[in-house]
Image (tube, rainbow, N blue to C red):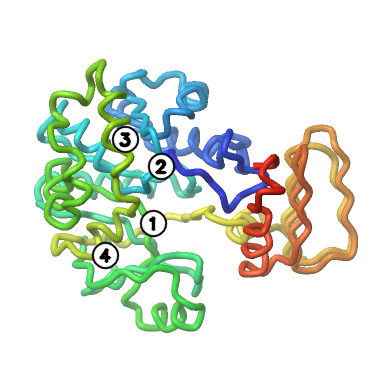
Amino acid sequence: MAGGLGTRFWPVSRDSKPKQFLRLTKTGKSFLRLAYERISDIIPAQNTFVVSLQRYKGLVASELPELEPRNILLEPYNRNTASCIAFACNTILKRDPEAVVLVAPSDQVIGDGDLFRETVLQGLEYASWHEVLLTLGVLPRRPDPNFGYIQTDGPMTDGTPIKVKTFTEKPSKELAQVFIDSGEFLWNSGIFIWKASVICEEIQRYAPEVAAQWNGWEQFLGTPTEKEYLERIYPDMPRTSIDYAVMEKSERVMAIPAKFRWNDLGNWDSLYEYFTTGESGNAVKTEGISKAEDIEKTLVLSSVKGKLVAVKGLKDFVVIDSNDVLVICPKDEKVLKSFISELSLPEYEQFK
């Protein structure tokens, strides 16, 4: 899934080139490239699909030149993950009615590649024999309020798939601590495994308003008239996530407790944690030259090549520098989110 707009990473992420195409990782590769390489020894290239937006067709092709053009699925508008998954799984279903599908976001960083591969293969095997919706739930390391949580109904020690009881989206830090203390909760990774036929059945059952837009899709998807068909149905496509539309309602949801290292880089706070080094807890990543003195728990990020970025005397701040925008703000998530949202006003539209 690579159709997100990455608005929470503004000003580095822009509408013209959102987060998934940026080289913000430690490897210097884009999030999308890393996501592709992560599954390349599990899923062959001819069976790998990327769902993005029509205006990002060139960016996807540039990042993944080995991908067949027919495997780049392009939505005319962003309508969240329910429509994205319905599009992909209906397309896959047309090619292979027995297909088992791995669904993965393109904006995550995952360590322990061998353990990730082992977990995914276990899930693919299980889903091929069971009519379930599997989600990979990551064993939590801390009470993080930036993640969703999955409550399970059973022991999580041996990695066996277990029944899911509830989903909770981004609780308070205090409630997240209660979740962790209970031993019943996992982080919601947003990585799913299921038969294409099963998820399409569940979308029909629990999100009929989404399913209704795909009536008659069989004669259009994968044909020269696909783009015209999508442009006709997407204006009425509900904007909803697969979690809200299906996962929170279905009786078929199970989770595999995953032990691999996982980071969902969904906001500046999570990116700060990803890049943090040293006792001072600073995260400094620049494309040019950086000089940072007397700073503590601060994120300094510059995407401008050859530029000197000098910072002194800051604590719990973010310094985000791009070609045309410089943001300096306290690192508190609520303050930063509110401040950046103010920059969505018409007078700042030229910088979007």
Residue 205 visible in the displayed image: yes
Q: Is residue 133 left or right of residue 264?
A: left
Residue 311 point in image, percent of width and height = 87, 55
Q: Amino acid at mark 4?
A: Asp
Q: Residue furthest top?
A: 224
Q: Marks 4 and 3, how far apart in space?
A: 22 Å
Q: Amino acid at mark 1?
A: Ser
Residue with the mark numbered 3:
42
Residue with the mark numbered 2:
78
Task: From this view, report whether residue 77 is shown above or below residue 59.
Answer: below
Task: From this view, report whether residue 226 is shown above or below residue 247.
Answer: above
Q: Quadrant of the C terminus?
A: top right
Q: Marks 2 and 3, how far apart in space?
A: 28 Å
Q: Marks 3 and 1, how far apart in space?
A: 18 Å
Please name the residue shown 36% across and 33% down the image: 75
How would you rate the neighbour count of disc 3 (Cα within 10 Å): few for under 14, some for 14-19, many for 20 or more? Answer: some
How would you rate the neighbour count of disc 1 (Cα within 10 Å): few for under 14, some for 14-19, many for 20 or more? Answer: many
Residue 112 point in image, percent of width and height = 45, 49
Q: Marks 2 and 1, how far apart in space?
A: 21 Å
Q: Earlier in the sequence, mark 4 or mark 1?
A: 4
Q: Amino acid at mark 2?
A: Asn
Residue 279 visible in the displayed image: no
Residue with the mark numbered 1:
189
Front of the two marks 3 and 1? 1
Front of the two marks 4 and 2? 2
User: What SS does tag 3 mark?
Assistant: loop
Q: Can you tell which mark lies on residue 158?
A: 4
State if disc 3 and disc 4 touch (CB < 8 Å).
no
User: What SS does tag 4 mark?
Assistant: loop
State the count of labels: 4
